Image: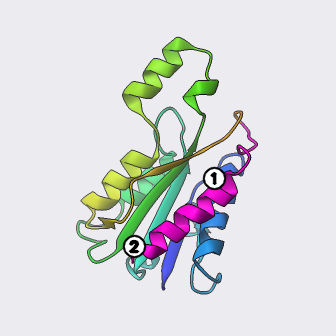
């Protein structure tokens, strides 16, 4: 299976999830895991599967991920299976009612990533997924790396 995992990461948590996903899907030769700043435009269309992830920043993906997705030509992902993930706080750990309300209204980064991938012609194979960080800089909630690997196996089964 030829796949590509693209991510952005601020504190390293999203990178850890991306690497767990890539490792679960295959060798680094078959499944490169690349930071968004290292992606060449042609790499996105040359894969059968594209997985994109970002930390949730102000209820959306990072500007680097947003710009990458905007730069994909219309129908540029035609024939490519796609999936999206993010890292986020669990709203049950947020003490602010206002922040919980805003999170419910605006959501997280994975959904807009998935929507943009589909708009560019990609075929979503699973719903967008979120992985939990315990604090602003991490760490990841215990078990999230294993959950990411399981999510990747779910994606692989949909191929």
Magenta residues span: 137-159
Indicate the position of residue 65 as horizontal and vertical percent values. 48, 54
Residue in the foreground of this view, choosing between 70 and 75: 75
At a point 62% along the width and 65% down the height, the residue shown is 149
Secondary element at tag 1: helix
Left or right: 39 as drawn, with respect to 71: right
Prevalent SS, magenta region: helix
- Magenta span includes 46: no
Left or right: 28 as drawn, with respect to 113: right
Q: Is residue 124 in view from this perspective?
A: yes
Residue 132, image quadrant? top right
Q: Residues within 10 Å of mark 2 (few under 14, many from 20)?
A: few
Q: Residues within 10 Å of mark 1 (few under 14, many from 20)?
A: many
Which is in the foreground here, disc 1 or disc 2? 2
Mark nearer the N terminus (1 vs 2): 1
Q: Which mark is residue 158?
A: 2
User: Which residue is disc 1 drawn over?
Assistant: 14
Secondary element at tag 2: loop
At a point 50% along the width and 53% down the height, the residue shown is 85
């Amino acid at each position: 299976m030829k796949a590509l995992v693209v991510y952005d990461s601020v504190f390293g948590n999203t990178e850890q999830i991306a690497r767990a996903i890539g490792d679960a899907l295959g060798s680094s030769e078959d499944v490169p895991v690349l930071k968004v700043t290292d992606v060449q435009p042609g790499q996105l269309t040359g894969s059968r599967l594209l997985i994109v992830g970002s930390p949730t920043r102000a209820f959306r993906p990072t500007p680097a991920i947003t710009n990458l997705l905007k730069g994909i030509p219309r129908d540029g992902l035609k024939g490519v299976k796609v999936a999206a993930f993010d890292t986020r706080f669990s709203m049950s750990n947020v003490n602010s009612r206002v922040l919980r309300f805003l999170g419910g209204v605006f959501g997280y980064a994975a959904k807009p990533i998935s929507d943009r991938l589909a708009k560019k012609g990609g075929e979503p194979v699973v719903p967008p997924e979120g992985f939990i960080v315990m604090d602003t800089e991490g760490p990841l909630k215990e078990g999230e790396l294993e959950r990411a690997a399981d999510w990747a196996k779910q994606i692989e089964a949909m191929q």
